Amino acid sequence: MGLLALACACNDDAGREFGAESLGTDNGDSGGETEATSGAGDGDGDGDGDPSGDGDGDGEGGCGDGVVGGEEACDDGVNDGGYGGCLADCSDFGPRCGDGRVNGPEQCDDANSGTSDGCLGDCKIPRSCREILNYDPNASDGVYIVAPKSPELGFTTNCDMTTDGGGWTEITLPHLCNGDLDTQISAIEAASVEGIDAMCRPYTRDGQGEHTYVFDLTFPPGFESFYLSAHVMKANAAGGDSSDITPAGFVQTDWNLGYGQAGDVSFGSADDAGPVVSYAALLVDPVSCQSCETALPLDPAGPYLVGSATTLFRVGWGESGSQSEGWYPWWSGSVYLR
């Protein structure tokens, strides 16, 4: 075309000799000026005025021009059948999110845009309710499938999409010992009896001494705040002894010390030096009993911010004195993480 343009600029006849007329470059004016000399062409030489045409004069593109036309289902200009692309003949899409087959970078593909079935419309498996809400800001409260630990270990849980902007993942007792999440009970100062019962509840009881324990829950997506819903603890003393919490006497502020004049049960982040909130901090009246159940006076209690984003939610507790006493620090209820 550079040679053609040069020829046309020098001599109209020379332009025709080089086929300018047959290529549709002569605009038919009396001076014999061609599109090549005027610079007013349509870009593809078909004379239809469409610079994105295919050069055949009909104004319609072809497979490979990057424009979907005619009977084409798609046309990305490459058409190599790659992920997210188009087949070579433009007859159909290549592998893509939404085709019902897991391929490319996809974690899942159920060919729908739903958010509650464990596979988002972008073919990712949500790890938390917050990720679901980030994908769909209009998601409502309800039961969803999330997979905090790994894509293969999804489970159903309640998502609170309303409180304080939403995105809260509910953690209940069954999640603590069935493999959904990882947990660990650790003695700072050991009791003679410790364990996790068949209902996934951690517990302790000392032998007429003192003890301090922490129970850590790993939440891989991470969280910055939490709240407690319908949370209940239970005393775990033996014989005629009693477990005690005295709000005016001791409130736990350090994970390494769960007792003073009495015990306490507390909650927060394992990455912080101590808890954010505890039963002793919220109770008005003391607790002193052998096996009574005590609910937090606030429901829900929180939300509470932890010191910084973390993956470790912690429950801490302890007891002191000469009696045989202890606690089920998480007897029933839920923790919501976000």
Image (cartoon, helix red, strand yellow):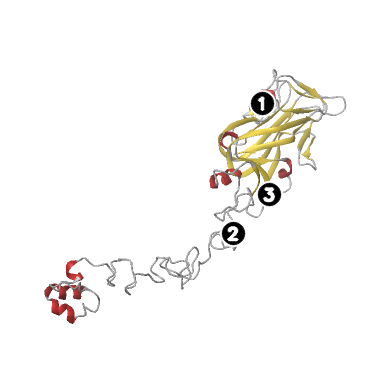
- Residue 252 is tagged as 1
Residue 47 location, x and y as percent?
Answer: 27, 71
Image position of 195 with respect to 209: above or below: below
Q: Mark 3 points at which residue?
A: 155
Q: Can residue 41 be seen in this view?
A: yes
Q: Between disc 1 and disc 3, whose residue precedes?
A: 3
Q: How many labels does the image show?
A: 3
Q: In this view, does 79 lie to the left or right of 13?
A: right
Q: Between disc 2 and disc 1, whose residue precedes?
A: 2
Mark 2, Cα crowd under 10 Å, few <14 / some 14-19 / many 20+, is some
**Along the line of sight, which residue is nearer the eye, 72 or 224?**
72
Q: In this view, does 318 lie to the left or right of 89?
A: right
Q: Can residue 273 be seen in this view?
A: no
Mark 1, Cα crowd under 10 Å, few <14 / some 14-19 / many 20+, is many
Q: Which residue lies furthest to the right in this view?
A: 239
Residue at 55% of width from left, 46% of height from top?
136
Q: What element carries label 1?
A: loop
Residue at 17% of width from left, 67% of height from top?
38
Image position of 256 with respect to 219: above or below: above
Mark 2 to mark 1: distance in Å? 51 Å
Q: Is mark 2 on a helix, strand or loop?
A: loop
Q: Nearer the viewer, mark 2 or mark 1?
A: 2
Mark 3 to mark 2: distance in Å? 20 Å
Q: Mark 2 points at which residue?
A: 111
Q: What element carries label 3?
A: strand
Residue at 15% of width from left, 76% of height from top?
7
Residue 9 location, x and y as percent?
Answer: 14, 72
Mark 3, Cα crowd under 10 Å, few <14 / some 14-19 / many 20+, is few
